Structures are given as structure tokens and as C-alpha cells.
Amino acid sequence: MLTALGVEAAAVAADVHLPYTALFAHDPTSVRQFIERVTGPVRRWDAERGTDLLATPHHLVDRNASPARAARLMGMHSNTVLQRLDRITQLLGSAWRDSGSFFRIPVAVRLHTLSEALRSSSHPLRRP
């Protein structure tokens, strides 16, 4: 799976990433396509504007879909989080928060975060 994320010469604990491996074991090359399909518009928005809008759904999931709890975690006012969620809805469409689609967001965000972290030279698991 790491190769599919574009990560070379890194080591991670397999059990931590087992759910992702199970999802993509049949076609590891689909990992990047999945990330792009699910989060691409938000990641492009962030890249073009120097923002981190993608952190919002990540924290929202970590706080059981509670915007107020996500706001506290992010050090923001809850209205700011709600505005960010509105922007994400504009970018991804209203279906992203439906129960059938919502589970894809944290998987894609976490895979993207893992990929970025492992590519970073400062990551503790990166080999020289």
C-alpha cells in the first residue's frame, strides 16, 4: 500500500494500517484514485489558497460528527467550522455527509495524511 501512496523506503506498523490495506489489497493502484475522487476538490482548494480546509472533516470525524466538538479541537468558533463545512459541501456536493458517503472522507483524509507524513523527511519512521 505504501508504494501505491508513492512512498518509498519507509516502514510502518502493518496492524495500524490494516483497515486501509484490506480496502485496497485487490488493487493498490486505486488508492491514489480513491483519494482524488473523494477529496480532490478540497485538496485543490487548499493548494490554491494556502488553507487547510481538509482538516475540518478529519476533525469532524474524530469528534463523532459534532461541529462544536470539532471546533474546540481545532481552536475555532463553531460558526467557523460550520462555514468551512458549507464550503466543503459546495466543493464536494451535498451527498458527502450522507451516511453512505461519509465514511469515505476519513479514510481518504487519513490515507492522504499518511502519504504526506511518510514522504516528509522528518517522519520518525522514514528510513535514510
Image (spheres, rainbow, N blue to C red):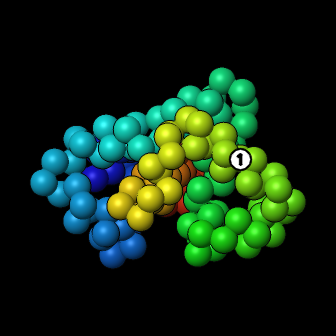
- Residue under the image location 66 percent in, 50 percent down: 85
Amino acid type assigned to the residue bearing label 1 in the image: Arg
Residue 49 in the image: above or below residue 22? above
The picture places residue 96, in percent across and down from the top left corner, at 47, 50
Is residue 92 toward the left or the right of residue 54 in the image?
A: left
* Residue farthest toward the top in the current orientation of the protein: 48
Residue 71 in the image: above or below residue 86? below
Of 56 and 98, the residue lying toward us:
98
Residue 48 in the image: above or below residue 4? above
- Residue under the image location 21 percent in, 48 percent down: 28
Question: Dot 1, crowdedness within 10 Å: few (<14), some or many (≥20)?
Answer: some
Choose top left, top right, bottom left or bottom right for residue 34: top left
Choose top left, top right, bottom left or bottom right for residue 24: bottom left
Q: Is residue 82 visible?
A: yes
Residue 58 in the image: above or below residue 15? above
Q: Which residue is mark 1?
A: 84
Choose top left, top right, bottom left or bottom right for residue 32: top left
Is residue 40 toward the left or the right of residue 47 in the image?
A: left
The picture places residue 89, in percent across and down from the top left corner, at 58, 43
Of 119 and 26, the residue lying toward us:
26
Picture mark count:
1
* Residue farthest toward the left in the current orientation of the protein: 26
**Secondary structure of the residue carrying numbered label 1:** helix
The picture places residue 60, in percent across and down from the top left corner, at 62, 64
Of 95 and 126, the residue lying toward us:
95
Is residue 69 toward the left or the right of residue 31 in the image?
A: right
The picture places residue 84, in percent across and down from the top left corner, at 71, 47
- Residue under the image location 56 percent in, 35 percent down: 91
- Residue under the image location 35 percent in, 61 percent down: 100
